Amino acid sequence: MEDNIETLLKSAESIVNRSGISSTLRPTAFGEVFRVLWQTDSLGMPVTPVERQQTLGNRPRPAPPISAKPAALVQKLIDDGFLKQPKRDIDVQAKLQVVGFNIPRKQIATVLVRKVRIGQLQRDKSDNGYVYFTS
């Protein structure tokens, strides 16, 4: 069973590496390629969740890649200079949705507040709520 998962992971990684996709979109592309490989058999025919369950038993799903976690995504936006100008949490959410990550606004706000607490971001109150920016 683990060999099947390892094979799928290696196949997905190989496909994404050969595709020339930008590093920003690689986690999303990897997830989609893995999902498609996971849902098909070696001939490309769809495999139902029941058939997959019979193959693997009751194993938990693998955790998402670390780069797909909200804190890492917000850090990438900081590193890319997106927060040089003041942005609201909804602006950060919209930017992440554009690149394929649908993260709840509350999770984004939590990450932004933590970044303020450790000194990576600053926060000011505006008419529309709080805005976050780098110093």
Image (tube, helix red, strand yellow):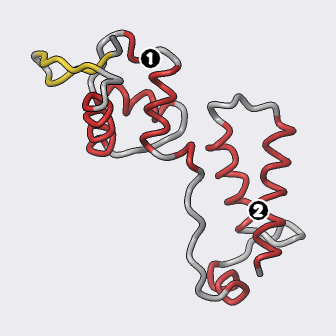
Residue density around tag 2, few if under 14, some if 14–19, many if 20 or more, within 10 Å: some
The image position of residue 59, as x and y in percent, is 60, 81
* Residue at 84% across, 56% down: 11
Quarter of the image where the C terminus is located:
top left
The image position of residue 100, as x and y in percent, is 54, 38
- Toward which corner of the image does residue 119 lie, by quadrant? top left
* Residue at 43% across, 42% down: 70
Q: Amino acid at mark 2?
A: Leu
Q: Amino acid at mark 1?
A: Phe
Which circle marks residue 82 in the picture? 1
Comparing 114 with 7, the one in front is 114
- Toward which corner of the image does residue 51 lie, by quadrant? bottom right
* Residue at 29% across, 37% down: 114
Q: How many marks?
A: 2
Q: Residue furthest front?
A: 118
Q: Is residue 19 above or below residue 119?
A: below
The residue at which mark 2 appears reads as 37
Horizontal placement of 51 versus 105: left or right? right
The image position of residue 5, as x and y in percent, is 76, 70
Residue density around tag 1, few if under 14, some if 14–19, many if 20 or more, within 10 Å: some
Which circle marks residue 110 in the picture? none
Q: Residue furthest left?
A: 127
